[in-house]
Image: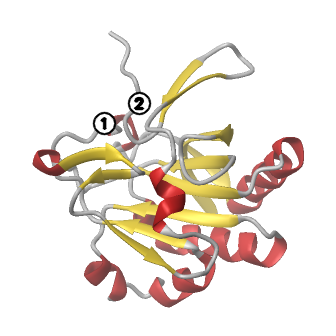
C-alpha cells in the first residue's frame, strides 16, 4: 500500500504542539478559495511512497530529533482514506507519538466515512472543516474560524495549540528554504 506524498519534514515547531514531523499528502479536490497550499492539490503531483517506508521515515525522525508527534496535512489526507488509516494505525501500534490530522472535510462528512472509527482510535487531535478565506484566523493552527478541533485523547487541550508559532522558516539538509506553519511567510 502506498501514499501519495507531497513532502515531509523531520522536525518542525510550527505545525502542532512540541517538535513534530510533518507529512503533507498530495491531492485535493476541495479547492478552497484562498488556500495557501495549492501545490498539494494536483493528484498527478507528489511521489508514491510505501506506507512502511513513510513509517520508517517517521521512526528515524523520532530517534534523530526526539519528536513528540506527527502532523498530517495536505492536500487532503482523507482522499487517501485507507492508506492514511493504515499509516496511523501502524504509528499507534509501533510508537508513542501523538497524531494531529488536518482535513478540509467537516466533522459531519467525516462521520459518514468508512474509516472514521479507525481514525478516532489513532488520532489525538482532528482539525477539520474547509478553509474559508473571509473567516481567516491564521493563529493557533486555525486557518479560518469555521475550523473545529476534536480531541480523541487526553494528550492535548486547546491551550497547547494557542502557543504554536504561526510560521516557521527551515533550511533543510540540501540547503532548500522551507516556509511552513498556519500563516507561513511568502517569498516574492
Where residue 165 appears, x then y in whole percent?
A: 50, 39
Could you tell me which residue is drawn at 37 percent across and 35 percent down? 183
Question: Which residue is more in the foreground, 182 or 188?
Answer: 182
Secondary structure beneath label 1: loop
Which is nearer the N-term, disc 1 or disc 2? 1
Give the class, few, some or many, for how many residues have Cα within 10 Å of label 1's Cα (few <14, many ≥20): some
Where residue 148 appears, x then y in whole percent?
A: 32, 69
Question: Which residue is more in the foreground, 40 or 155?
Answer: 155
In this picture, residue 36 sits left or right of residue 159: left
How far separated are the C-alphas under marks 1 and 2? 9 Å
Quarter of the image that includes the C terminus: top left
Where residue 169 appears, x then y in whole percent?
A: 55, 24
Secondary structure beneath label 2: loop
Could you tell me which residue is drawn at 69 percent across and 61 percent down? 51
Give above or below for 163 relative to 7. below
Give the residue number, with chain letter if any, for mark 2: 184
Residue 178 shows in this picture = yes
In this picture, residue 153 sits left or right of residue 96: left
Give the class, few, some or many, for how many residues have Cα within 10 Å of label 2's Cα (few <14, many ≥20): some
Contact, mark 1 vs mark 2 (Cβ under 8 Å): yes
Which quarter of the picture shows residue 78? Answer: bottom left
Badge number at residue 148: none
Give the residue number, with chain letter if any, for mark 1: 36
Foreground tag (1 vs 2): 2
Question: Which residue is more in the foreground, 34 or 181?
Answer: 181
Amino acid at each position: 500500500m502506498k501514499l501519495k506524498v507531497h513532502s515531509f519534514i523531520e522536525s518542525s515547531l510550527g505545525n502542532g504542539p512540541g517538535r513534530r514531523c510533518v507529512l503533507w499528502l498530495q491531492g485535493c479536490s476541495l479547492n478552497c478559495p484562498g488556500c495557501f497550499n495549492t501545490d498539494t492539490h494536483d493528484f498527478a503531483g507528489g511521489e508514491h511512497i510505501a506506507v512502511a517506508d513513510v513509517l520508517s521515515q517517521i521512526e528515524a525522525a523520532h530517534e534523530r530529533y526526539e519528536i513528540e508527534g506527527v502532523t498530517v496535512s495536505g492536500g487532503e489526507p482523507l482522499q487517501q482514506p485507507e492508506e492514511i488509516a493504515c499509516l496511523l494505525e501502524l504509528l499507534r501500534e509501533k510508537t508513542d507519538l501523538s497524531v494531529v490530522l488536518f482535513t478540509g472535510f467537516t466533522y459531519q462528512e467525516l462521520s459518514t466515512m468508512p474509516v472514521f472509527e479507525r481514525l478516532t482510535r489513532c488520532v489525538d487531535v482532528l482539525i477539520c472543516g474547509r478553509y474559508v478565506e473571509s473567516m481567516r484566523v491564521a493563529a493557533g493552527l486555525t486557518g479560518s474560524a469555521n475550523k473545529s478541533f476534536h480531541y480523541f485523547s487526553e494528550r492535548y487541550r486547546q491551550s497547547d495549540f494557542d502557543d504554536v508559532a504561526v510560521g516557521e522558516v527551515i533550511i533543510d539538509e540540501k540547503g532548500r528554504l522551507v516556509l511552513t506553519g498556519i500563516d507561513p511567510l511568502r517569498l516574492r
